Amino acid sequence: MQHFHRVACGLALALAATATLAQTPAAPQAAASSAPADADAPPAQSRLTARLMYELLISEMLFRQGDAQNSTGTMLSAARRTGDESLFKRATEMAIQSRSGPGALDTARAWRQAHPSSIEASRYELQVLIVLGRIAETEAPLRAVLASLPAEEKIAFITALPALYQRAPDKAEAAQTVQRALSEAVKISALAPAAWTTIGRMRLQNNDHAGALAAATLGQDANAQSEWPALLALQLMSGAGEAKAEALIQRHLSHPDARPEVHIGYARALVEQGRHADAHAQLNTLLHRSPDNAEAWLVRGALYADERKDTEAEADLQHYLNLARQPDQTAGADHARLMLARIAERRGDYAAAERWLASVDSPDQLLAVQTRRAQILARQGRLDEARQAIRNVPERKPEDARQKLLTEAQLLRDHQQPEQAYQLLTEELKKDPDDEGLLYDAAMAAERLDRMNEMERLMRRLIELNPDAAHAYNALGYSLADRNLRLPEARQLIEKAVQLSPDDSFIQDSLGWVHFRMGNVREARKILEAAYKKRPDPEIAAHLGEVLWVQGHHDEARRIWRDGLRQDMDNETLQKTLKRFGVTP
């Protein structure tokens, strides 16, 4: 009975693999005449002969039994004899499913040799070569696919290539191979912007920022209205920190029909750099041109919320929700509701906050929703219930348990329980001593407890693991500066953070603060004023106000402190500063 079941399954697969054979004439036919078909004419003869049926059945049975070599060989032999493309495809799939890379390459190449114009055969060969790491050999099938594709599909294929080659072991070889394969595409005006963008992205995967910028420039020179080079420039500006890319973005946006996605991407990049005024200008321009662009309202609302301009944020987010009716905007709508809940919480309107939280639909946002609920409970003095609310969140993904623990530790730190936070984090660090997130959070909990030796040990370990961790250099440098300890070393650490993240307003705040501690008051004021202009945060307001107060500018200091209190009445640094000076702004 078991043997019969296997035969039946194999027969079903064989029939599926040859579904087109019974309908395919044995030889090419002349073009059909315009005369009606003869009703009495005999049906076309099937090519599914007894021999072929037997070969296909044997091949599928061998494949089911794990004999990949013989099953693939039998199927390939039938494909070569009949010339049927579906059999070449089945033979290639058999080799792939059997994890036989060389076998899959042989069958794909036999398929392409028999059907030189087959796009699918070239695609399979291309993908198998990439998996095998034989990148230089992908040029020919890549050219073949591109040449065979309809004109309307070429750009989509070209722009998908960086993702296809993402796991190539030799990024430089991959970039060179793709550039050679696209050597004709860059000469065609309709394809040049996308082709140069793909070449640039391949170079970016190889950390060749200058080469990527050059490619983006060539793509934009081919057509400044194309969004592709501008999108590459955005990637360079935000991800790679390439300042010269901004001019390419601005050039594209100077055209009245510039893509909204570029406006929004540019605004997001500006926010990342702390250039809030410039981000507002971009979003305002886009909303003037396209007042129904829902995403622009969402991004501007989020920016207002980050700046604690809650009235403006609420208006924009509500407007976004009125516009966002499409299924693909569900995630954005939930994000807007979470922000509205946070604004209501800041206002002390916990009932309104709960209504917004209850309206969030996505299971992926459950931890975010419960975190906000926990914050509300903690604000009401119900910290144990808050912690339990986070612990009760179901763990849908492997990383959820870690995220829950980090969230609980943050909750404890925010509500003056650093000892419990530290114990929670250090216990978890015993299981994974090199987890960067745990190291940073445990170090900050130790800092709250004034255990500077432990804080420094943890931060030094984090820097050892990740020498580019700007936030770690900054946190350690600021903690030393704030305590007037080893100020030259503190300045050196903060300057390293500035080098790694030059546009971060909080790192600039640390730099201003260490200058102030070292007695460089004028330099401190200049740096802090620039940081506060970029990001009017209460923490920066506390430091800038103190510098102004020490300089004798008491009215100006009070104004800055009042602005900070309007943003966050409970900010710990600001409250300590006011208490130290005995000032009520």
Image (cartoon, rainbow, N blue to C red):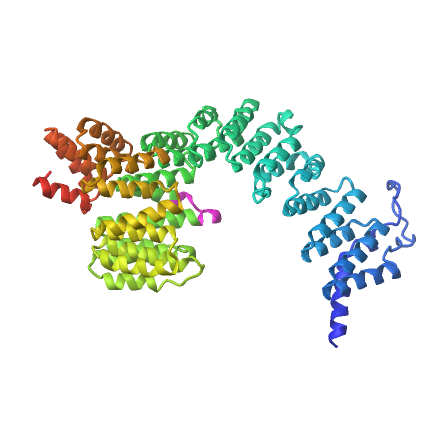
Q: Residue furthest left?
A: 582
Taking the magenta stretch, the answer to whether it contains residue 277 is no
Residue 12 at what x, y percent from top left? Answer: 75, 64
Residue 559 at what x, y percent from top left? Answer: 15, 33
Residue 516 at what x, y percent from top left? Answer: 19, 33
Location of residue 283 (image quadrant):
top left
Q: Residue furthest top?
A: 221
Residue found 57% across the figure and 45% down from its top: 167
What is the magenta segment's predominant secondary structure? helix
User: Can residue 574 be spotted in the picture?
Assistant: yes
341 w.r.t. 116: above or below: below
Residue found 38% across the figure and 48% down from its top: 335
Q: Is residue 405 left or right of residue 116?
A: left
Q: Residue furthest bottom?
A: 1
User: Can residue 354 be spotted in the picture?
Assistant: no
Along the line of sight, the residue nearer the viewer: 112 or 67? 67
Quadrant assignment for the N terminus? bottom right
Taking the magenta stretch, the answer to whether it contains residue 328 is yes
Residue found 66% across the figure and 38% down from its top: 136
Residue 484 at what x, y percent from top left? Answer: 18, 40
Along the line of sight, the residue nearer the viewer: 96 or 313? 96
Question: What's drawn in magenta, residue-wise?
Answer: 321-330
